[in-house]
Amino acid sequence: MSVNADELALENLDRWFYFFKKGLITRREFFQAVLAAGGAAGAGVFFPEAPLGARVPEARAAASKDTITLALNSDLPTLDPHMHILREGIIVMYHMFNNLGTRDLKTMQIGPDLATSWKIVTPTTWDMVLRQDVKFHNGDPFTAQTVKFNYDRVLDPAQKSPQRGNHEAIDHVEVTGPSQVRIYTKRPYPIFVERLQNFQMLPEKYVKEKGDAYVAEHPVGTGPYRFADWRRGSEINAVRNDDYWGPKASIPHAKFRAIPDVATSVAELLAGNVDIVRYVPTDQMAAINKSGRARAVVQRILRVQYIALDAAGRSGPNPFTDKRVRQAANHAMDSDTYIKRLQPGGDKTPAVLNPLHFGYDPSVPSYPHNPDLARRLLAEAGYKAGFDARWLTSNLGMPSYQTVNDAIGQDLAGVGIRAKQQYIQATQTLVELITSGKAGPMFDFSWGSYSVFDADGLYWDCFHPSSNLSYWKHERFAQLIKAARGTLDADLRKRFYASAQRIVHEEAPVIFEWGFHSVFGVSNTIDWTPEADEIARLYNAKPR
Amino acid sequence: MAKLPRARGGRGRAVSLPARAACNLSRALVVLFGISLITFVISHVIGDPLAVLLPLDAPQATRAVYRHEMGFDQPVGIQYLRFAADVVRGRFGDSFLVKKPALALITERIPRTLLLAAAGMGVALAVAFPLGILAGARRRSFADSASIVLAVAGAAIPIYWLGLMLQILLGVHLHWLPPSGYGSWRHLVLPAFSLGVFLAPVTMRLVRSGMIEALAQDYVRTARAKGMPEGAVLLRHALRNMLIPVLTVLGLQFGQLMGGAIITETVFSWPGVASLVVQAIQNSDFPVTQAAVMTLAVIILSVNLTVDTLVGALDPRTRA
């Protein structure tokens, strides 16, 4: 029951490849590494399993459950919950703050958090009742005025909150009682409740007295853990809030460690210094499971990936402006095999929507793998001899993305679409190319919908013709998704989205991939289940 | 290595120490100007800072306002002059991402990177000098062959691979040291050792060849002839004379050391300046990138400058 050194060594090959791709090492160094892998496998013979595990008595592991540690791939730029749009930030903030509503992980619906209930009064007015027993970590009470202050703050253009767009439909908030507010929206706002789960409440007096710069380093919330210290670039520490108004956390301390390299996080997990690692590479699952110290847990998440095609010709004329070519590309894909062989699993997304999105229509079929049909469609479109196309690729969180892309590239080339991969290291750079219209004709893209489990969170942001992320223009589709965000009638919305999905499927503005099944490494010293919304809640963990 | 003698030869006469220092300093200033220009051009050509500052769906009008506010709509020449004027005063602006002065973020991290670099250098010297001297003094002996094998192995092993293997062996399997992180001397051991192994081979080979060369000199024969003990010959005469080229190369290697630190810091989650720079580059955070490149350039240049000047001081032939 111990780690096999040979296996880990060989599995690190893809890390070196990653370093190589990132330009951190030269081609020569990369080949040296590959050669050295042989040596490492040999080293396994000299360092057999004997001393492992034996040196870590069970007692040590149990005693260390004073602290639960989560590995994050980067440090945070700020601890102000309104001044970032990072997944890592959402996770950390969830521990120190509360939201008005929060997701019930059993039903996946939004349930009460700081607000006990809400109801719709008119299509553009919501009444909300708040908890009365909540105090911030500094003793300030949580009141109706707090809610008004927080909405005002995030909506104030001078605040420059990058989350402003998430709440743009809110017009204003009115305090109607000590623990009651009325919220006015600019239009009927069907995902009002969905947005409640990711908007953390700051104490008004504290923020006004101390100023934003201070708050960004000394967060005060109402959450199950209170902020302890922040060692920039290294770790964020929090201690259990023993006066918490809700169910208290089982483990007294929570630690968020910035570990940029995944291989290092896995090593720390196996060494017992880290309890949860996100986005574990698929090929490390076996080594983790065999270690006896940790387990690899697969969880389906909301995030979807696809290869966008420049159907609108935003970056110039290209073959994908012809629908038949886009359909041909989809017929060339052997998605079932990729998911089965190269992924820890995945949910097919025949119209990009994840089955976890509200509005997903399971009756939309996916494109069958049919290379002959693909070649025929290409010939009909006038590309009998095929064509070359640039394909911007990037690591956007898909497990083993490089292997998957290579497989897709092979299958596309097989029907005549010779896609040449061009790797973009920084997501930010890819996003800049996309938003400025220079990413065509093919680019990797992935979207987590800001944890909004509603078709609007994906279709509106990525496919509405007015979005700078969209490389496809379709009038009818745009009308449908606009209508779906303008009514509160759930059945009607479902019907709008069903029609929209048929259009997306038929028009194939992208090469459809799938919703991720993400791999988490979890220490055997805790009981903990990963969540579909990618918010790792350490306060739900229990020592084993 | 050959830089200084050539400079001296070009003038045809020995140069006094202050004059040499002044000459080196002026050269360093030219290099600094070049670096500032390159840094500025690259950061303003590659990325658009507005993409970081504003949300994805910010309207075009908002973008224009910000572009103007930040001065990104001015001619590039003016932007560079403003940048250069600020740099001289140590003002790099606030980080777009962290909203704190960029230089403060860098100076907070620099001591950690220097600590790692110094420890790595220490390990390299501790390995390179004894082995190099031994190999040079006992040419073609078993010790010499062993040192060659070690040097080839050390040079061939990529630093990140060695780092990962050390983590797995000493951190995961044996539980002797923490695999990564920052906080105590125990966290320093593995990254310093990895860096040391990265640096040691070149230094060791240099000490060895310097030793061989020095031992063939007349003054060594004289020393031996006067009956000096072999140890004293090695250390007092040979070693002192071969120190000059070794010192020069060590100075030049300092830049490489900082480069090696980037990978080492990433592998070992060492919160030094390198990880900050990588993050800044990925997020088009110009102020931090610029502050980091300029600060590192100043550090590396001053190390080289000190070494150049020191070499002059050590070499008696340069004394007028």
Image (cartoon, rainbow, N blue to C red):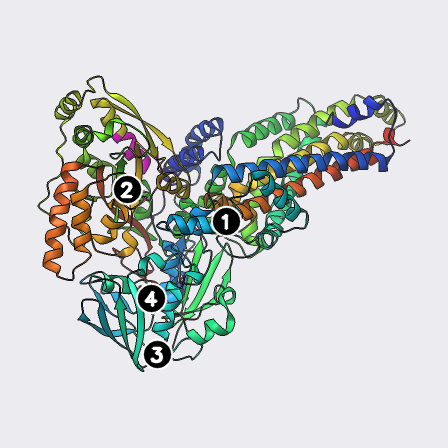
Residue at horizontal 61%, vertical 52%?
A: B107
The question of residue A399 being in magenta is answered with yes
Q: Is residue A361 visible?
A: no
Q: Label 4 vs label 2: CA separation?
A: 38 Å
Q: Looking at the rendering, in which quadrant would you find the C terminus of chain A?
A: bottom left
Residue at horizontal 40%, vertical 41%?
A: A432
Instruction: Name the residue that disc number 1 marks.
Output: B68
Magenta span covers which residues? A393-408
- Chain containing mark 4: A
Q: Label 1 vs label 3: CA separation?
A: 40 Å
Asked if B153 appears above or below A108 in the picture, the reply is above
Q: Label 3 vs label 2: CA separation?
A: 41 Å
Asked if B57 appears above or below A65 in the picture, the reply is above
Instruction: Name the residue that disc number 2 marks.
Output: A470
Instruction: Name the residue that disc number 3 marks.
Output: A143
Report the amino acid beneath label 3. Answer: Thr
Same chain assignment for discs 4 and 3: yes
Report the amino acid beneath label 1. Answer: His
Q: Label 4 vs label 1: CA separation?
A: 45 Å
Q: Looking at this view, is B1 or B198 the one in front?
A: B1
Sequence-first tag of 3 and 2: 3
SS class, disc 2: loop
Asked if A453 appears above or below B292 in the picture, the reply is below
